[in-house]
Amino acid sequence: MKAFYGDLKLGILGGGQLGRMLIQQAINYNVTVKVLDPDRNAPCKKLCDEFVVGSLSDYETVYNFGKQADLLTIEIEKVNVDALAQLEKEGVLVYPQSRIIRLIQDKGLQKQFFKENDIPTAAFKIISSVEELKEKHFHYPYIQKLRKDGYDGRGVYKVWDESYLENAFTEPSVIEELIDFEKEIAVIVARNALGEVKTFPMVEMEFNPEANLVEFLISPSLLNFEIHERAEHIAIQIAEKLNIVGLLAVEMFLDKHGNILVNELAPRTHNSGHQTIEGNVVSQFEQHLRAIFNQPLGNTACLNNAVMVNILGEEGHEGPAVYQNLEEILKLEGVYVHLYGKALTKPMRKMGHVTAIDADREKAIEKARYVQKTLKVVS
Amino acid sequence: MKAFYGDLKLGILGGGQLGRMLIQQAINYNVTVKVLDPDRNAPCKKLCDEFVVGSLSDYETVYNFGKQADLLTIEIEKVNVDALAQLEKEGVLVYPQSRIIRLIQDKGLQKQFFKENDIPTAAFKIISSVEELKEKHFHYPYIQKLRKDGYDGRGVYKVWDESYLENAFTEPSVIEELIDFEKEIAVIVARNALGEVKTFPMVEMEFNPEANLVEFLISPSLLNFEIHERAEHIAIQIAEKLNIVGLLAVEMFLDKHGNILVNELAPRTHNSGHQTIEGNVVSQFEQHLRAIFNQPLGNTACLNNAVMVNILGEEGHEGPAVYQNLEEILKLEGVYVHLYGKALTKPMRKMGHVTAIDADREKAIEKARYVQKTLKVVS
């Protein structure tokens, strides 16, 4: 492989905020970056050597884009995998590998993979039609998830009792036992082509039951050490079974009985790792670059308590984005603002994130709460 | 002033590594960035919304470039100040202000400013011709510095005795007592338009007497607290006398008698502040943006010991740059590589820098020494 600076052409499928933060880090290594995204105003547009507007799901578009790169990576799973498989055959490095993207694109295959490899996960069944759902008997309540194309809460439906069946998805789906969880936790793991594997310390999500939303991400988690070890072991096990090259985010539930159950995988940088930019020795973006460039992985230790808040478009506002009270946020110490360069806001759109660090965990949480109630994206 | 995100057009005069690292940080604030540089392959080229190739010293070029910005800043002092003064009259914000750039461009005016404001500095005289130098009697040895256009050691000449006069500069210059210094130290100070002022903790340079070169920059300095206080006080005094908006780097000597003498000013981000990216709560780049956007200044405290090494082009190598042993460097923990995206190397050209952090200062220095002897830029 070429030296990973100067001459190496890195292609990124997807030009959103994950690509943007990856480029921000890649600048340190002189990498030549090309980006493909359907949105001509995607967050990466101005920051790369070449920005190509085109569909990520179209075979020809992805193939032609990839053919001009030495190394391809993704910042979104929904890409044309057949084109990536062909590019791999023709000698382009694709990390994560196309077979892993294909597996993870399909929640049915993902669940089967867990089962086959003794990865703990909620009990599930695969359903090919709504008739099958109605014919068979499952314990209520349960969750129905579309096998493909669901994300950020879309493609997920809760079936509380028989009366909910009439609005159930009609497409192929997975139905899953509803877990009454204690905590949502996540571990990001990296693996390079030499087989070196490293996890970031486990993080936990702070849930707001009123808003029914993850409010914050807290790093490192304060759950007991044995849970950390178990969660990190599971993440490593998955990365090694997959032989993935690159980053893998493993989202898990800790149930009320202390069991850890894997919820979902993302074979890329992830929202649950943004706090690593300021909170850890290396960030998830640096680590992903090191992994796909087959370089030594960095030390993932936490430098500080870090609490991350997503900055979402305010309800009732759609149009050109205006950021209110940013000045108030910048008065706080150890608070880092990351805006994603999106011109238009809409309700719940991820417009940026803020990370608060502090040697005192409670103070970091306090700052994050203040950010959350103060910084508003309106139009 | 417009909100400092989204709609604000920031123009940067100079497209080198300082501009590059400033953009890397400005990405977090959605700023629209335009860059002017004479080199069509300048490090900022691919990272800004608009890159203009043109002379920084030409009135028309600077004026036309600046006319399309809301706010102008610099990453190099050698720019056309008359154009900036005119733009200020026409309502463009120029930070640092043109009168400060004019003062600092001229080492004679700079020294007079120190004298008039009781800023401690080496004794000096201003010379308008080589004849004047020969006519007058000064104590040998002394240093002759060109009033204008000297930088990175250029434009500086040591006069050890009379025999050196024949090679002395013939242009207007400053002659200065040669300080037998104990340490070179530096303080970076920021001031915003509201008058808020903050210094970064003082750093010291580790000199290699054999190579006659600054080897490392060490942050924070371990000199005693009283020296820190005095140096920071001097930096604040200068920033306030100048009423500067933006960053000001103050390079000083600590002489053998414990006196602090100001050597030179730079009204911008500076090589002596690169370690703040990983070593301090806010970096010098973030702080400069906050200052020129008139936002609250950030906490400058050190998070860790940080040792910075410049990565210079190897002697005897000129041409397309090749970076040797980067993989060895990435094996170290807490070591951060910043390459500047320069395609061509030449002897002593600044091609990048590496910062090593460690809770143990000696270990940070050890890592930096290893980087210095291991990472080579050849062609």
Image: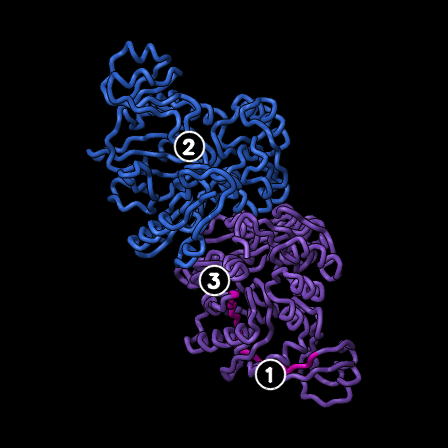
Chain colours: A purple, B blue
Q: Name the residue nearer the viewer: A83 or B288.
A: A83
**Residue in the foreground of this view, choosing between B192 and B286:** B286
Frontmost residue, A269 versus B316:
B316
Q: Which chain carries label 3?
A: A
Task: Give the tally of numbered discs.
Answer: 3
Number of the front mark, 2 or 3? 2
Counting residues from the start of the chain, the first of labels 3 and 1 encountered is 1
Q: What amino acid type is highlighted by mark number 1?
A: Glu
What residue is disc 2 on? B266
Q: Which of B338/B35 is in front?
A: B338
Discs 2, 1: same chain = no
* Spot occupied by residue B230 in the image (x, y as percentages of width and height): 28, 37
Q: Residue B317, relative to residue A105: is it above or below?
A: above
Identify the image quadrant of residue A14. Answer: bottom right
Magenta part of the chain: A174-193
- The label on residue A365 is 3
Q: Are marks 2 and 3 on the same chain?
A: no
Query: Residue B296 in the image: x percent, y percent?
Result: 48, 44
Magenta span includes B263: no
Which amino acid, mark 2?
Answer: Ala
Query: Image point 52% across, 78% down: which residue?
Result: A254
Q: Is mark 3 on a helix, strand or loop?
A: helix
